[in-house]
Image (cartoon, helix red, strand yellow):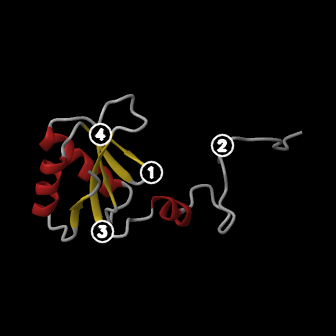
């Protein structure tokens, strides 16, 4: 009678190491960028509101969130991490370019029109 039939306690298991919280899966999903940092301004899919998108950062997980927090404070805007890229509200390309150059990212470029 004490047999466990179904439990959502662990969630999904990694097929490689069979653990509930798998480091190898988290690293693959977060995957750092290619190192060529590109800053663009996009309005597509945002109902006409623009956002500055930063791609290719060689950071993952908490480091990406720390950088986002700093950029949000320096630009006085909101933002989010989505699919390994940073999004800031509004056109912040020039400010972000200057801030990332100050932090020592060598290959920061403006992308798009």
In the rendered view, tell whether residue 27 sits above or below residue 69: below
Q: Secondary structure at mark 2?
A: loop
Give the residue at mark 4.
Answer: 51
Q: Quadrant of residue 110?
A: bottom left
**Which numbered disc, 1 or 4, marks the residue closer to the eye?**
4
Residue 38 point in image, percent of width and height: 28, 60
Q: CA distance from mark 2 to mark 1?
A: 26 Å
Residue 39, percent from left and from top: 26, 54
Cα gap from disc 4 to disc 2, whole angstroms: 38 Å
Q: Residues within 10 Å of mark 3 (few under 14, many from 20)?
A: some
Give the distance between the C-alpha atoms of the residues marked 1 and 4, in whole angstroms: 15 Å
Residue at position x 27%, y 57% in the image: 111
Residue 51 falls in which quadrant of the image?
A: top left
Q: Residue at x 40, y 39 (%)?
A: 44
Q: Nearer the viewer, mark 3 or mark 2?
A: 3
Badge 1 element: loop
User: Which of pointers 4 and 3 lies earlier in the amino acid sequence?
Assistant: 3
Residue at numbered disc 3: 36
Lower sequence index among marks 1 and 3: 3
Q: Residues within 10 Å of mark 2 (few under 14, many from 20)?
A: few
User: What residue did someone put label 1 on?
Assistant: 83
The image position of residue 82, as x and y in percent, is 41, 46
């Amino acid at each position: 009678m004490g047999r466990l039939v179904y439990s959502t306690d662990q969630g999904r298991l990694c097929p490689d190491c069979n653990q509930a919280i798998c480091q190898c899966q988290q690293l693959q999903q977060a995957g750092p960028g290619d190192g060529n940092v590109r800053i663009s301004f996009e309005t597509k899919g945002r109902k006409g509101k623009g956002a500055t998108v930063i791609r290719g950062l060689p950071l993952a997980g908490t480091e990406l969130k720390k950088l986002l927090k700093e950029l949000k404070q320096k630009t006085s805007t909101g933002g989010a991490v989505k699919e390994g890229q940073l999004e800031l509200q509004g056109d912040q390309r020039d400010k972000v370019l200057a801030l990332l150059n100050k932090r020592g990212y060598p290959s920061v470029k403006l992308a798009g029109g």
